[in-house]
Amino acid sequence: MIVVLRLGHRIKRDKRISTHVALVARAFCANEIVFSGDEDRELICSVKKIVSEWGDEFKINYEKNWRNFLKRKKEEGFEIIHLTMYGLPITKLIEKIRISNKDKIIVVGGAKVPGEVYEIADFNVSITNQPHSEVAALAVFLHEFFQGKELEKKFDGKVRIIPQEKGKKIVRN
């Protein structure tokens, strides 16, 4: 089980980036995304609609209190992986994370990540030590975690893309 926790969603500023975090989580084989910060029913409906159209059992939820959520999940045996440019390089940690049979929470930040997240996390992982997008960090992390196999996943949606060398082919069931 892989759950992505998006910290500090702000309705007025983060709608697009938070949607992209959810899309990457789903497409790269996470099981669920949980948002904290502002409760955004429109975001939740939008992601549910994509899941309905494009397939999968991907879930989206809101948690008002991210601290309680992380503490509860840690008590349930989840490992907490925080993606941050201040962490240790992914190349040094990914194998240890991959071979662990524990369920995982992958934390991606918002505006400013509270210092407490660094302490709660079992792993503070950097994709790079340069400023970058949480969307990119999540995609790279999941790609490394699944060793590229997530790119082969077949989704059972109402809408499918038929790969083409040129042009677009969309099939609707």
Image (spheres, helix red, strand yellow):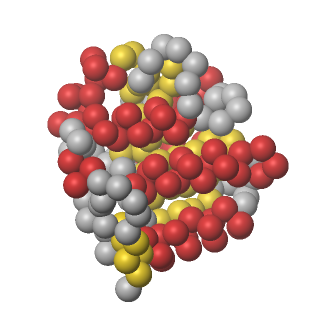
The residue sitting at 51% across, 24% down in the picture is 84
The residue sitting at 78% across, 44% down in the picture is 13
Please say if 152 is above or below 90: below
Q: Give percent across and percent down for residue 160.
A: 37, 71
* Residue 17 appearing in the image: yes
Please say if 161 is above or below 74: below
* Residue 72 appearing in the image: no
Nearest the viewer among 66 and 160 is: 160
Nearest the viewer among 131 and 7 is: 131
Q: How many marks?
A: 0
In the picture, measured across the screen, residue 93 lies left or right of residue 109, that is: left
Nearest the viewer among 5 and 70 is: 5
Q: Give percent across and percent down for residue 158.
A: 40, 80
Q: Quadrant of residue 98?
A: top left
In the picture, measured across the screen, residue 94 lies left or right of residue 82, that is: left
Q: Give percent across and percent down for residue 27.
A: 39, 55
Q: Residue furthest left?
A: 99
In the picture, measured across the screen, residue 38 lies left or right of residue 51, that is: right
Please say if 123 is above or below 105: above
Q: Dividing the image into 4 quarters, which one contains the N terminus?
A: bottom left
Q: Quadrant of residue 152?
A: bottom left
Nearest the viewer among 158 and 21 is: 158
In the picture, measured across the screen, residue 46 lies left or right of residue 30, that is: right
The residue sitting at 44% across, 18% down in the picture is 128
Q: Dividing the image into 4 quarters, which one contains the C terminus?
A: bottom left
The residue sitting at 18% across, 37% down in the picture is 99
Q: Residue furthest front?
A: 166
